[in-house]
Image (tube, rainbow, N blue to C red):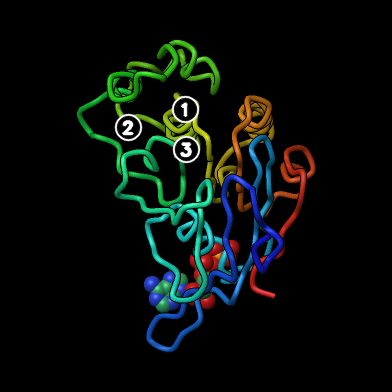
Amino acid sequence: MSPAGTGGALLVAERASLVVDGATLLPETSVAIDAGECIALLGSNGAGKTTLLRLLSGRVRPSGGRVLLRGRPVEEREAATRRAMAMLIEPPALYPDLTISDHLALVTALWDDAGPVEDALARFELVALRDRFPHELSSGQRQLAHLALVFARPAEVLLLDEPEQRLDTDRRGLLAEAILEARERGTAVACASHDPELVERIADRRVRVGE
Ligand SMILES: Nc1ncnc2c1ncn2[C@@H]1O[C@H](COP(=O)(O)OP(=O)(O)OP(=O)(O)O)[C@@H](O)[C@H]1O
């Protein structure tokens, strides 16, 4: 058993912290997420939720403690880690000259386990917008496009930073369904959110960050 009592979980942060130039971005934090479990990360603005998600993704190394995926230090550069994880932390730029369905077709081409483009469009009600370019979308519709890209393939781990941003109530419902579906398939989910209703629907456990 690890010191934090987290042995065996799919994704584990063991007393992970991040200090940059003397500033504490994340105090020592331990969290363990099992396959098929959804953890909601709660905390006030600046508490460290995004920082924790970055550490869990392996994109940023903790300055103290460690992050383990299946018992091994998480390293974003490893192909196996990239394959295991899907995430929406900072939304990546969309290509201005590609339509929404072009973007999804790229994901399908890159990942052999991705589902059909049609399914990804339908999941977030983007079928009617499939031929639009990013600049022809509202900010909420762009957020839906980002979500469609993230959910287009199954992943062992799903990391989401305030995925409800800019979505109306009905679309937040679609998001909750997509997260619950992933959880049922066995995905380990960490989701930072300021939406109590979304958290109530999706979370097995709540972790308060920064305290
Ligand atoms: N690049 C940076 N350099 C220095 N400090 C930073 C940097 N990025 C974030 N911080 C600080 O790190 C702390 C944690 O920020 P983080 O973005 O993880 O918070 P959060 O919980 O996600 O907040 P929010 O709910 O506002 O999104 C904050 O105090 C923030 O000011």
Between the residue at mark 3 and the residue at mark 1, the CA separation in whole angstroms equals 9 Å
Q: Residue furthest front?
A: 1
Q: Earlier in the sequence, mark 3 or mark 2?
A: 2
Q: Are marks 3 and 2 in contact (CB under 8 Å)?
A: no
Residue 67: image location, x then y, percent: 50, 60
Q: Secondary structure at mark 1?
A: helix
Residue located beneath label 1 in the image: 148
Please rate how many residues cluster around mark 3, counting C-alpha atoms within 10 Å: few if below 14, some from 14 to 19, many from 20. many
Q: Looking at the image, which residue sits at the far bottom?
A: 22
Say if 43 sits above or below 73 in the image. Answer: below
Q: In the shown orientation, is residue 30 left or right of residue 59? A: right
The residue shown at (70%, 49%) is: 195
Q: Marks 1 and 2, Cα distance to the nearest angstrom?
A: 13 Å
Give amino acid for label 1: Ala
Q: Secondary structure at mark 3?
A: helix
Write down the residue under mark 2. Answer: 134
User: Image point 46% across, 50% down: which residue?
Assistant: 89
Residue beneath disc 3: 143
The image quadrant that residue 100 belongs to is: top left
Say which amino acid is labelled 3: Gln
Task: Indicate the amino acid at tag 2.
Answer: Pro
Which residue in the rendered view is the most extreme toward the left?
97
Q: Residues within 10 Å of mark 2 (few under 14, many from 20)?
A: many
For residue 66, the mark is none
Say which of 163 and 75 sits in front. Answer: 75
Q: Nearer the viewer, residue 76 or 205?
A: 76
**Quarter of the image containing the N terminus?**
bottom right
In the rendered image, the vertical position of residue 57 relative to residue 118, given as above or below: below
Residue 77 at x, y percent in the picture: 29, 49
Residue drawn at x 60%, y 48% as measured from the top left: 190
Comparing labels 1 and 2, the label whose residue is closer to the camera: 1
In this rendering, position of residue 71 left or right of residue 43: left
